[in-house]
C-alpha cells in the first residue's frame, strides 16, 4: 500500500517498537505489539537526499503508540529533489498474516483512519 502525504509528518500506524531507523531518516521500521513488521519509506529515491529535509523524533528501540510522531520532513523539498512523494507502507513479514483487508478510504487522517485491517496468525 502507498499514500500520498498531505503534509510533512509520519506518525506510527500501530502500537509497537522502532526496529530500524535508516541513517538518512527517509525510512523507518516498526514491529507492532502483535508482531507485524512495517516499513514506511517516505518518497521514492529519497535515499539520495542523504537526510536533507528529514528529522527523526524516535530512535531504534523506542516504544511507540498509534499516532506518535516518528519523522517530520520538508514536503516541498522532496517534491523538488525526489522522483515522487508517494510513500510506500510495506509489511516485511507477511508470512505471519492470516487475513488482510484494505480499507477503501481516499483520504486518511494520521493516527485515526485505518487503511488496513490485518489479522495475525495465532
Image: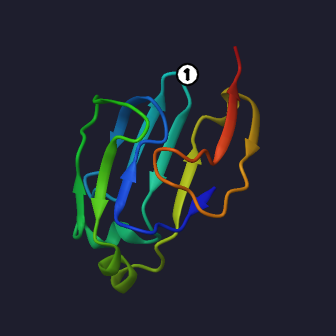
Residue 14 relative to residue 25: left or right:
right
Q: Is residue 1 above or below residue 92?
A: below
Q: Residue at x 23, y 69 (%)?
A: 53
Residue 5 relative to residue 119: left or right:
left
Q: Residue at x 52, y 69 (%)?
A: 86
Q: Report x, y in % for residue 9.
A: 35, 58
Looking at the image, which is closer to me, 74 or 104? Answer: 104
Residue 8 relative to residue 53: left or right:
right
- Neighbor class of circle 1 (other Cα within 10 Å; few <14, some 14-19, many 20+) is some
Image quadrant where residue 78 sits = bottom left
Q: Is residue 94 above or below residue 79?
A: above
* Residue where numbered disc 1 is placed: 34
Q: Residue at x 35, y 86 (%)?
A: 80
Q: Report x, y in % for residue 61.
A: 28, 28
Residue 33 relative to residue 51: left or right:
right
Q: Is residue 12 above or below residue 17?
A: below
Amino acid at each position: 500500500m502507498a499514500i500520498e502525504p498531505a503534509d510533512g509528518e509520519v506518525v506510527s500506524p500501530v502500537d509497537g517498537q522502532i526496529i530500524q531507523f535508516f541513517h538518512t531518516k527517509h525510512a523507518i521500521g516498526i514491529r507492532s505489539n502483535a508482531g507485524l513488521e512495517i516499513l514506511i519509506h517516505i518518497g521514492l529515491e529519497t535515499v539520495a537526499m542523504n537526510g536533507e529535509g528529514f528529522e527523526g523524533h524516535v530512535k531504534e528501540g523506542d516504544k511507540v503508540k498509534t499516532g506518535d510522531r516518528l519523522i517530520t520532513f520538508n514536503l516541498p523539498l522532496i517534491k523538488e529533489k525526489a522522483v515522487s512523494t508517494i510513500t510506500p507502507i510495506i509489511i516485511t513479514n507477511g508470512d505471519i498474516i492470516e487475513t488482510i483487508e484494505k480499507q477503501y478510504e481516499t483520504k486518511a487522517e494520521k493516527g485515526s483512519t485505518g487503511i488496513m485491517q490485518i489479522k495475525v496468525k495465532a
